[in-house]
Image (spheres, rainbow, N blue to C red):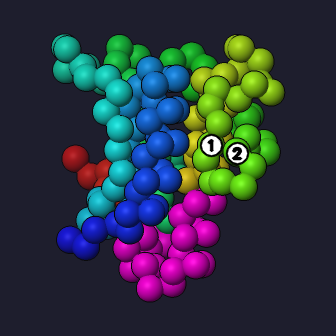
Amino acid sequence: MAELPPDLVRRLTLAIANVAELIDGSCLVVFGPDARGVSYDGRTSKDGQSHVFAILAGTRAILTTIFQRALPAWISEVKRLRDRPMNLIDGEWTLVVPDPTVSAADQKPAALAALIDYIALVVEAHVELHPEDEALVPVLTDAMIDDLFKA
């Protein structure tokens, strides 16, 4: 399996780690049918129980978030907070979480929503700048998605 480009991994790893710490979960971004990806294991289940929230992050990635015990109640708020302007450090591609422009109650769903949009933006920008890497992060088809979630 070919490796993901280091600059893409570096950008995504920092954002994923920051959000995973804030939401008290683990995150995995999956690209393509062979499930190559970038992950951050923020929490490990002691009892083997985990609950997964997976969502498309653009057309090339799936963000899978793993929570212990149960999915948090705030997960239903993620959709409402999608497509907000992302808080990025000026001149850099660094996602800022927690976002000081968001209420305390919305910090976790806003961070996860921002991460979803950030992944889509960073991956598309990378492919635009490096078209030779497109095979490493292909556009996901329904068949690829089905294969990723087969038991």
Residue 94 appearing in the image: yes
Q: Please name whichever residue, 7 or 4, is drawn nearer the observer in this view of the structure.
A: 7
- Going by the numbered disc 2, the residue's amino acid type is Leu
The answer to whether 112 is drawn above or below residue 121 in the figure is above
In the picture, residue 91 is in which quadrant?
A: bottom right
- Going by the numbered disc 1, the residue's amino acid type is Leu
Residue 142 appearing in the image: no
Report the residue at 43% width, 46% height from top. 13
In the picture, residue 103 is in which quadrant?
A: top right
- Give the magenta-colored segment's residue range: 120-143
Q: Are marks 1 and 2 in contact (CB under 8 Å)?
A: yes
Specify the label residue 88 is tagged with: 2
Q: Quadrant of the N terminus?
A: bottom left
Residue 81 horizontal side relative to residue 69, left or right:
right
**Horizontal and vertical percent position of residue 94:** 61, 47
Report the residue at 47% width, 51% height from top. 12
Report the residue at 73% width, 40% height from top. 87
| Overall secondary structure of the magenta section | helix
User: Is 141 one of the magenta-colored residues?
Assistant: yes
**Horizontal and vertical percent position of residue 54:** 45, 42
Q: Which residue is mark 1?
A: 95
* SS class, disc 1: loop
User: Is 115 one of the magenta-colored residues?
Assistant: no
